[in-house]
């Protein structure tokens, strides 16, 4: 639970969100995967009633058995519908396939067409890239949608293990934390093709048992041995272990004349040679790997030019003259090691001859894994029609961050950022230039930090974010700049702006490499009490608000009430709507404070009462978020007013500000609560009166009852897994839920609109 929110002006201490995101990885090797009575795939998509299937050429002849399996599931009543698309259909004619966030956008658009709800799923059936694109897109669709990756090629399986819990795209440095990764290997259809050669070599580098077997047998038809090695290594190393990335460090040194598979093979063999010269791998293993590469038609390793080795080591070395990297070992532990730069340079440029490896012709291996072999490897029983062997991993990812109030956060001499910036780091600051001098102020702040040694260099990127422009295009802009600057885990993203810009930058930070922390400096009241203190980030897509997003905590949220004096009255009212939202469903005393002192908030006065209002609003929000950080429970009190509010925003073409739409949403929900017996007339009148006194509307001409009813049915219910979960007050300070849409009706929504319109046009305050 968060700390009690007690604030001393300018003190660094404040409230803290303490939460945990649990992520899981499962890999299954399945025989008879598409047999109608095999439950593995149906169990993998879980409670989903609708599926989006994204397939590519790798599925080939195995695509029809999958379709047959899905149709059988429909006949049994286990599935309502499924929708198939081709992975590269986003590229027309001879155009190159869509890359980066564009590829994810294509999958999400298909998910919208397939009418996927929050508890539905996406199935990828194809190669490594298709699986990764689907994993990243599904992790973002409605902030998390289940994804199942079905592969029949060894390269894709190894790629999944290399990524682990984070699916990665090479374009623009994109990664995404997949909270539930389920990889299924179609064991019956496993391919033998040229692209598998490097994957086989990478497994042999890690698994001495596989290397020994391949040294004594024919590499053709070795898929069963390779899958056995995958399962052994999963038990030993686990998905995402650094050992899966053996050889990647040497790719920049690979001869440019080599084709991509040969470059990767060269880097793996170079890693093995360096490990031998550093005493970590016996010569016999290196010779066996060279022999295997030759039989796989991959060129054996060649020594690196001494001058090239020296330059590479110099760039890779840290300040103490050492280099940390992952190297293969005799026992395949593959842990990162720290090596003296001089010793590493010698190992890289050593021309020692290690020839003489085995190239014995061998016997063919078996074409499928035997039940005994699999059971011995994984220790799991058979299940259903075919054998199911696998491994799984669960990891708790902390999602903690402080919310601090500080004065003069942008002052050049200020120290608000001091403990958040690693020494000599790089900062990319994304700034909303809503005030004429805002960009200059941030520039002076970071110049002061650089002069005092808090950072080495910085870049300021102005972006004006509105609900119309809060989209993948703006996210891609931030990603391109971050990639161009080479931001890494010891660098920082800084966002200075309102909730809309924080959503864009937070989502970009989530996608960018997964290890570059970001810092929020909210400049609006909405940002301070809502967007800045939550985990949710995201962008709009094709008129759907926040359809793409994630739960991604910042490093910290730094609030400065001086920004409130720069805001227009309409912006302050929007923030006050979010305060009232939390007061109505969580904190009766906060509601009473707003009743008495809302004029001070709207005048941006820095009084003890205003500070107490802000503190209580933030505290209420953090308590709610700590109990349910990633919305596994879809009954969320902070959604009060948002079920209608999001619809009203988009129906108005975003003419209505977010807070204005939420205020109308609160009025509509509260009237429905009154009509259904949840809320008494006195508390309804008290809430509506406060909204009017603060200048917030109860109704707007965009309130089309039929359209709102359709939005509830077509957007809110699917987003909440088939339930309405409409947040309503029981009394001021206590929230509840209308869970089923059957508890209300289109006529009741029409009555609510009519009543609120009459109040709007009737007597004022």
Image (cartoon, helix red, strand yellow):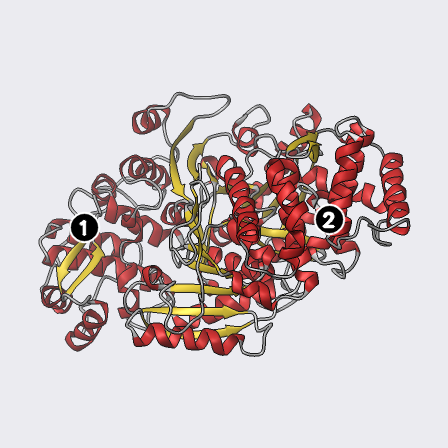
| Residue shown at 77% from the left, 31% from the top | 741
Nearer the camera: disc 2 or disc 1: 2
Front residue of 72/737: it is 737
Mark 1 crowdedness (10 Å alpha carbons): few <14, some 14-19, many ≥20: many
* Residue 714 shows in the view: no
Determine which quarter of the picture holds residue 257: bottom left
Above or below 441: residue 591: above
Q: Which mark identifies residue 674?
A: none
In the picture, residue 419 is in which quadrant? bottom left
Indicate which disc, 2 or 1, sits on the residue closer to the N terminus: 1
Q: Is residue 134 left or right of residue 484?
A: right
Q: Secondary structure at mark 1?
A: helix
Q: CA distance from mark 2 to mark 1?
A: 70 Å
* Left or right: 4 in relation to 36: left
Residue 658 visible, this angle: yes
- Name the spot of residue 434 as percent of width and height, x first: 60, 72
* Residue tagged 2: 663
Image position of 722 with respect to 465: above or below: above
Quadrant that contains the N terminus: top left
The residue wearing badge 1 is 288
- In the picture, measured across the screen, residue 617 lies left or right of residue 199, that is right
* CB within 8 Å, label 2 to label 1: no
Compared across the picture, whether 164 is left or right of 734 comes to left
Residue 453 in the image: state x and y as whole percent: 28, 72
Q: Residues within 10 Å of mark 2 (few under 14, many from 20)?
A: many
Q: Nearer the viewer, residue 343 or 385?
A: 343
Rendering coords of residue 641 (x, y %): 70, 43
Q: Nearer the viewer, residue 747 or 303?
A: 747
Residue at 62 percent across and 56 percent down: it is 601
Q: Quadrant of residue 2?
A: top left
The local secondary structure at tag 2 comes to: helix
**Residue 690 versus residue 502 in the image, above or below:** above
């Amino acid at each position: 639970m968060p700390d009690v929110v007690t604030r001393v002006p300018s003190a660094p201490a404040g409230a803290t969100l303490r939460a945990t995101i649990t992520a899981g990885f499962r890999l299954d090797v399945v025989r008879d995967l598409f047999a109608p009575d095999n439950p593995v795939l149906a169990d993998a998509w879980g409670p989903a009633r609708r599926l989006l299937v994204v397939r590519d050429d790798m599925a080939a002849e195995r695509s029809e058995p999958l379709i047959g399996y899905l149709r059988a599931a429909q006949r049994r009543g286990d599935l309502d519908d499924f929708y198939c698309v081709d992975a590269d259909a986003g590229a027309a004619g001879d155009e190159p396939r869509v890359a980066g966030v564009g590829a994810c956008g294509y999958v999400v658009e298909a998910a919208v067409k397939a009418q996927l709800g929050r508890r539905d799923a996406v199935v990828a059936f194809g190669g490594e890239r298709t699986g990764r694109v689907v994993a990243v897109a599904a992790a973002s669709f409605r902030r998390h949608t289940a994804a199942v990756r079905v592969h029949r090629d060894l390269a894709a399986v190894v790629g999944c293990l290399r990524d682990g819990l984070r699916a990665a795209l090479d374009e623009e440095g994109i990664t995404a934390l997949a909270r539930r990764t389920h990889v299924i290997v179609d064991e019956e259809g496993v391919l033998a093709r040229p692209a598998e050669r490097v994957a086989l070599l990478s497994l042999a580098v890690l698994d001495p048992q596989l290397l020994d077997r391949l040294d004594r047998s024919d590499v053709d038809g070795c898929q069963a041995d390779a899958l056995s090695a995958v399962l052994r290594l999963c038990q030993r190393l686990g998905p995402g272990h650094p050992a899966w990335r053996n050889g990647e460090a040497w790719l920049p040194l690979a001869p440019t004349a080599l084709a991509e598979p040969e470059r990767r093979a060269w880097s793996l063999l170079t890693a093995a040679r360096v490990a031998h010269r550093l005493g970590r791998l016996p010569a016999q293993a290196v010779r066996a790997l060279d022999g295997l590469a030759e039989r796989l038609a991959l060129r054996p390793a060649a020594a690196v030019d001494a001058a090239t080795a020296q330059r590479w080591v110099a760039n890779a070395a840290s300040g103490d003259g050492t280099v940390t990297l992952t190297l293969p070992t005799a026992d395949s532990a593959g842990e990162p090691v720290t090596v003296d730069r001089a010793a590493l340079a010698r190992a890289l440029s050593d021309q020692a001859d290690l020839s003489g490896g085995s190239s014995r012709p061998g016997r063919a291996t078996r074409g499928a894994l035997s039940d005994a072999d699999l059971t011995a490897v994984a220790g799991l029983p058979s299940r259903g029609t075919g054998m199911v062997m696998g491994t799984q991993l669960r990891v708790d990812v902390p999602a903690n961050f402080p919310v601090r109030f500080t004065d003069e956060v942008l002052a050049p001499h200020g120290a608000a950022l001091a403990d958040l910036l690693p020494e000599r780091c790089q900062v990319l600051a994304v700034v909303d230039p809503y005030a004429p001098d805002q960009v200059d102020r941030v520039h002076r702040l970071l110049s002061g930090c650089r002069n005092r040694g808090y950072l080495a260099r910085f870049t300021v990127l102005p972006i004006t974010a509105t609900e119309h422009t809060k989209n993948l295009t703006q996210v891609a802009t931030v990603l391109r700049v971050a990639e161009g600057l080479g931001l890494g885990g010891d660098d920082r993203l800084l966002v200075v702006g309102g909730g809309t810009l924080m959503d864009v930058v937070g989502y970009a930070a989530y996608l960018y490499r997964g290890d570059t922390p970001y810092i929020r400096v909210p400049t609006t009241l909405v940002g301070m009490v809502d967007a800045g203190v939550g985990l949710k980030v995201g962008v709009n897509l094709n008129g759907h608000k926040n359809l793409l997003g994630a739960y991604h905590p910042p490093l910290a949220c730094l609030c400065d009430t001086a920004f409130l004096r720069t805001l227009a009255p309409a912006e302050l009212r929007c923030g006050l709507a979010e305060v009232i939202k939390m007061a109505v469903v969580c904190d009766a005393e906060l509601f009473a404070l707003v009743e008495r002192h809302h004029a001070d908030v709207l005048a941006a006065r820095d009084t003890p009462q205003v500070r107490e209002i802000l503190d209580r609003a933030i505290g209420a929000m953090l308590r709610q978020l700590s109990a349910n950080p990633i919305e596994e429970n879809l009954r969320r009190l902070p959604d009060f007013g948002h079920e209608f509010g999001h619809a009203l925003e988009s129906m108005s073409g975003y003419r209505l500000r977010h807070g204005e739409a939420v205020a109308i949403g609160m009025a509509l929900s509260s009237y429905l609560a009154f009509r259904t017996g949840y809320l008494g007339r006195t508390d309804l009148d008290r809430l509506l009166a406060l909204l009017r006194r603060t200048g917030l509307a109860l109704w707007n001409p965009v309130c089309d009852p039929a359209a709102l009813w359709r939005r509830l049915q077509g957007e809110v219910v699917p987003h909440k897994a088939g339930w309405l979960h409409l947040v309503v007050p029981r009394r001021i300070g206590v929230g509840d839920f209308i869970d089923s849409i059957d508890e209300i009706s289109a006529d009741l929504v029409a009555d609510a609109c009519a009543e609120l319109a009459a109040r709007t046009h009737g007597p004022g305050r």
